[in-house]
Image (cartoon, rainbow, N blue to C red):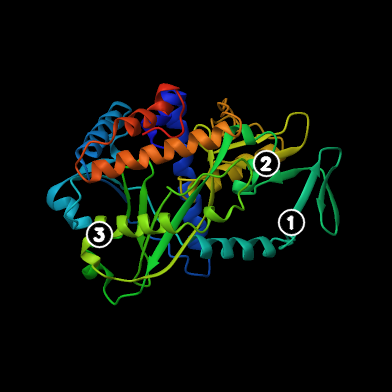
Amino acid sequence: MSLPTLASMLGRDRALEAARLGSAAQDAIRAFVGACDADLWWIEGGGLKVATTPAHERKLADFAGSMAELGASGMARTVQGDELRALIDSPVFRAGVFFPEEATVHPGRLVRALHRKALQLGVRIHEATPMTHVVAGSPSRVGTAEGEIHAGEVVLATNAALAGERDVRARMVAFSSFAMVTAKVDDIAARSGWRSNCSLSDARMFLHYARKTLDGRILFGAGSGPIAYGARIQARNLSHDQSTVDRVDAAMRRLLPKIGDLPVERAWGGPIDVSSDRMPYAGTRAGTRIHYGFGYSGHGVNPSYIVGKCLASLVLREENEWTRSAFCRRRLPALPPEPLRYIGGSMIRSAILSCEDAEDDGRKAALYARTVARLPALLNLRIGVR
């Protein structure tokens, strides 16, 4: 979520405080990576958001103006012409905004490093042990297929699986995100025109995101997959949807046409958790010591540290900058109940994709699509807004 959007939702001061905590999280992740005895593919190349249509250009111009008004122009600067092409040379990029603070990390390598560190600290990890139920109490009881665990403090950090949690389900929806990775090439910069080490995203609502990898590939994805019905996150189309895979592949070749027929080596998808206002959140079930964190999706690895600090503070009953922040203290709007959420969400998804495809093609979308795509904004929602 952008800083101007945060400011419109939280007010200027609370938005800037959230941004400061994001910078603190970035520093902490950098320090952890630097102290590791393994290569986590940490690259501080900044991030580039590009406009590929006139509507996107206007959107980025408005964003840059709002950043300046907030006194945060140093966190994002407009790039055009030769400066833009020096980062990524693509004929469809009309303008861009560069975020110098952004970095990328290999999330799988990071998880393995965190796993090793936890074991070194004496943490016991029980994998392949699904939770079947949790009962609040003193202590609370967490059920598994082979017995119960009694705990004074319980943290539910199960990503999209929290869609069934009673305190979360009205304030979270599970979308799906799909990504693919190309085959290796000896000189991916020459093959793609991607000359810098920045990450890439575009200005669509269901944005495309991409990065180069250190072994000579391009990873490219989009958060535009099907929506889950309630807590049914195991639905096959959330992880296997060929139409979405085809859309992602077509988008990659449109944004990076220099790759030509570079083959895709693997594609995959899965459910992602999106809060009702699109900002991560950590909380405690009223009257219990059961805590939960959700809404990470679309924000990268950074919020995992922020929400981790929030959850740790809640468990320790500490009053600090994390628990006082908007990541813990704000009112999340309730989403419509099922089946209205699924039906409406699916209609809006299709309409937005139709509108954005039309913009890419330089044509006007059908009136029906334009009308339905505007519904979230008209209803004052924060999710599904173009």
Viewer-nearest residue: 132 or 245: 245
Residue appearing at x 69%, y 64% in the figure: 119
**Picture disc at residue 256:** 3
Viewer-nearest residue: 196 or 23: 196
Task: Locate residue 74 relative to residue 82 in the image: left or right.
Answer: right
Q: CA distance from mark 3 to mark 2?
A: 39 Å
Task: Locate residue 213 relative to residue 110 in the image: left or right.
Answer: left
Q: CA distance from mark 3 to mark 1?
A: 41 Å
Task: Locate residue 193 relative to residue 351 in the image: left or right.
Answer: left
Amino acid type for the residue under numbered disc 3: Leu
**Picture disc at residue 130:** 1
Quick one: SS at disc 2? helix
Quick one: SS at disc 1? loop
Is disc 3 surrounded by few (<14), some (14 to 19) or many (20+) residues within 10 Å?
Answer: many
Earlier sequence position, callout 1 versus callout 2: 1
Residue at numbered disc 2: 164
